[in-house]
Image (spheres, rainbow, N blue to C red):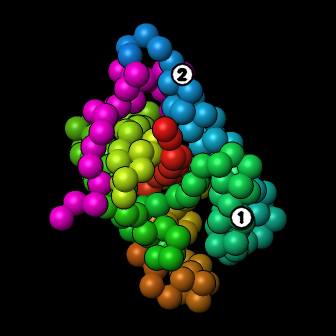
């Protein structure tokens, strides 16, 4: 039994990493969707904040430092953005590192699988996003996901050849880690945002 019923046909966004407007809007083809614009802005804020902290951490202490930032700071950044915006903001992946906060729900799994299919068909991961209005437990929700591409920066902790020191640190921080074996350009996961709507 599927817990989510689709209320509005989905949007596939393919023009730019955080395109200003989707090709199709759930409201109309000419009316900008304020939820979509806000979701993209919050995603950009999360991505840029986390990236700058990761770059600084790697510069200061290498990949081992980055593990601590992803483990501790990424959830804190998500919580701060969630608290100030009223959205539920998180990162998810089919190959999660932290099952408690990174495991996708059924809707997110479907979107991530579609992202992998879109990549296999030749679409750049950097441009992949998906938005949909769903009904869940009697409440309408606007849901948005933006794919996270695996970059060169990610490979030290998520790649196919991880140093023994990094592997040991990952094993200690994440005993059930599944987030390894990626190559540049793979779908690492996605930013996932949800907001209750009328």
Where residue 35 sits, quadrant-wise, is: top right
Which residue in the rendered view is the most extreme toward the top? 30
In the image, what residue occupies the spot 50% across and 88% down? Answer: 175
Where residue 170 sits, quadrant-wise, is: bottom right
Q: In what quadrant of the picture does the N terminus appear?
A: bottom left
Q: Reply above or below: 4 against 22.
A: below
In the image, what residue occupies the spot 74% across and 49% down? Answer: 84
Residue range of the region highlighted in magenta in the rendering: 1-27
Q: Reply above or below: 1 against 166.
A: above
**The residue tagged with tag 1: helix, strand or loop?**
helix
Spatial CA span between label 1 and label 2:
27 Å
Q: Main secondary structure of the magenta part?
A: loop
Along the viewing direction, whichever of 51 and 73 lies nearer the viewer: 73
Q: Which residue has dot 2 on it?
A: 20
Can residue 63 be seen from the camera position used here? no
Along the viewing direction, whichever of 5 and 79 lies nearer the viewer: 5
User: In the image, which disc is placed on residue 76?
Assistant: 1
Q: Is residue 14 magenta?
A: yes
In the image, what residue occupies the spot 37% across and 53% down? Answer: 138
**The residue tagged with tag 2: helix, strand or loop?**
loop
Q: Earlier in the sequence, mark 1 or mark 2?
A: 2
Can residue 71 be seen from the camera position used here? yes
User: In the image, which disc is placed on residue 141?
Assistant: none
Q: Reply above or below: 149 against 35.
A: below
């Amino acid at each position: 039994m599927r817990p989510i019923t689709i209320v509005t046909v989905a949007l596939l966004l393919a023009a730019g990493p955080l395109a200003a407007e989707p090709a199709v809007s759930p409201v109309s083809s000419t009316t900008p969707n304020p939820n979509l614009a806000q979701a993209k802005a919050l995603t950009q804020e999360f991505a840029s904040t986390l990236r700058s902290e990761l770059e600084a951490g790697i510069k200061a202490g290498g990949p081992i430092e980055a593990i601590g930032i992803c483990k501790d700071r990424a959830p804190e950044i998500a919580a701060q953005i969630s608290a100030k915006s009223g959205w539920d903001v998180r990162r998810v992946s089919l190959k999660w590192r932290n099952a408690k906060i990174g495991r996708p729900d059924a809707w997110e799994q479907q979107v991530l699988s579609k992202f992998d299919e879109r990549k296999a068909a030749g679409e750049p991961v950097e441009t992949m996003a998906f938005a949909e209005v769903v009904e869940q437990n009697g409440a309408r929700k606007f849901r948005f996901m933006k794919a996270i591409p695996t970059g060169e920066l990610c490979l030290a902790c998520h790649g196919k050849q991880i140093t023994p020191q990094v592997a040991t640190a990952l094993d200690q921080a994440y005993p059930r880690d599944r987030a390894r074996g990626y190559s540049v350009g793979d779908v690492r996961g996605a930013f996932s945002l949800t907001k209750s709507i009328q």
